[in-house]
Image: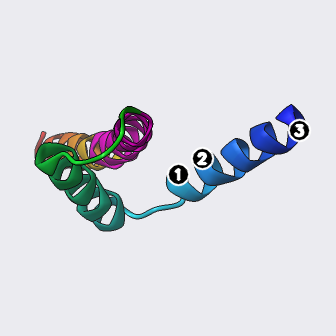
Amino acid sequence: MAKNTDEAQEQAQTQTQALGYEQARDELIEVVRRLETGGQTLEESLALWERGEELAKVCRHWLEGARARLDAALAAETERED
């Protein structure tokens, strides 16, 4: 049974990583809203927290990629000007 659980978690993580920035951000906003309103059990709150952490990583990845592209474009522009 642990093998099935591990496979399900791996599949969920792969699906999370495939999210676009806006999708991950919107879902993260919803997770935060649900955590702030409360009413969940401890287990539900922990699951929401873990989901939020995964979504935050996806957002960070997209933002870091965007920053790298901007930096590269700015560096290329500077080289053309020199």
Q: Callout 1: helix, strand or loop?
A: helix
The image quarter in which residue 43 lies: top left
Residue at the spot of label 1? 17
Q: Amino acid at mark 2?
A: Gln
Image quadrant occupied by the C terminus = top left
Q: Give the number of the disc on residue 13.
A: 2
* x, y percent for residue 17: 53, 51
The image quarter in which residue 1 lies: top right
Residue in the picture at 13% in, 45% down: 36
Q: Is residue 49 visible?
A: yes
Q: Amino acid at mark 3?
A: Met
Residue in the picture at 22% in, 48% down: 39
Q: Is residue 80 visible?
A: no
Q: Earlier in the sequence, mark 3 or mark 1?
A: 3
Q: Is residue 48 magenta?
A: yes
Residue in the picture at 42% in, 44% down: 51
Relative to 21, say whether 80 is above or below.
above
Tell whether label 2 touches label 1 (CB within 8 Å): yes
Q: Is residue 9 left or right of residue 20?
A: right
Q: Amino acid at mark 1?
A: Gln
Distance, label 1 to label 2, CA atoms, is 6 Å
Instruction: Mark 3: give few (<14), some (14-19) or many (20+) Cα within 10 Å.
Output: few
Q: Is residue 59 left or right of residue 79?
A: right
Residue at the spot of label 3? 1
Q: Toward the viewer: 2 or 29?
A: 2
Which-is-in-front pick, marks 2 and 3?
A: 3
* x, y percent for residue 13: 60, 46
* x, y percent for residue 50: 42, 35
Q: Is residue 16 magenta?
A: no
The region drawn magenta spans 43-64
